[in-house]
Structure formats: C-alpha cells, structure tokens
Amino acid sequence: MIECEIKYELIELIFRIRFQEDSQQHIIESKEFPSDAANNYLQ
C-alpha cells in the first residue's frame, strides 16, 4: 500500500509518501515540492 499526504507544520508544507515493503514501513518526505518526494520514491 502507498499513501501520500500533505502535512502542515507551522508555516511549512511537508509532502510525504509512505509505503510498506517486506514488513518494513518507509517514509519519504520533501519540504520543497510533491514531485521531489515522488522522484525520491522512484529511485
């Protein structure tokens, strides 16, 4: 399962992708752009 979310922390946006692989949960974040988080997921 893959989840995407946008979180507001104080005055910043955090774009986050969560996914599970081999019983381990992974989180990829970007404070710049949603596409940065997506590109990091694809690498």
Image (cartoon, grey):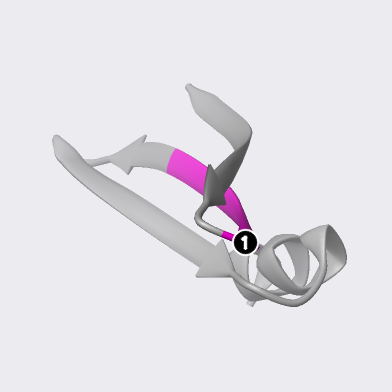
Q: Image height check: is 31 above or below 7?
A: below
Relative to residue 32, is residue 13 drawn left or right?
left
Vertical placement of residue 17 versus 40, above or below: above
Is disc 1 surrounded by few (<14), some (14 to 19) or many (20+) residues within 10 Å? Answer: few
Q: What element carries label 1?
A: loop
The C terminus lies in quadrant: bottom right
Task: Name the one closer to the observer, 26 or 10.
Answer: 10
The x, y position of residue 30, in whole percent, is 61, 71
23 to 35, vertically: above or below: above
Report which residue position mark 1 lands on. Answer: 11
Magenta segment main secondary structure: strand
The region drawn magenta spans 11-18
Taking the view exactly as shown, the residue that stands out farthest to the left is 23
Residue that lies at the very extreme toward the top in this rendered image: 1
Q: How many marks?
A: 1
Instruction: Describe residue 1's horizontal placement relative to residue 36 as left or right.
Output: left
In the image, what residue occupies the spot 54% across and 30% down? 2
Would residue 20 appear left or right of 29 to someone viewing this image? left
Q: Which residue is located at x 38 percent, y 54 percent? A: 27
User: At x 63% / y 74%, what residue is drawn?
Assistant: 40
Q: Which amino acid does label 1 sit on?
A: Ile
Q: Is residue 28 magenta?
A: no
In the image, residue 12 above or below residue 21: below
In the displayed orientation, state which residue is furthest to the front.
10
**Quadrant assignment, res 19:** top left
Residue 9 is situated, as x and y percent measured from the top left of the image, at 49, 53
In the image, 41 versus 33, the foreground residue is 33
Where's residue 20, x and y in %?
32, 36
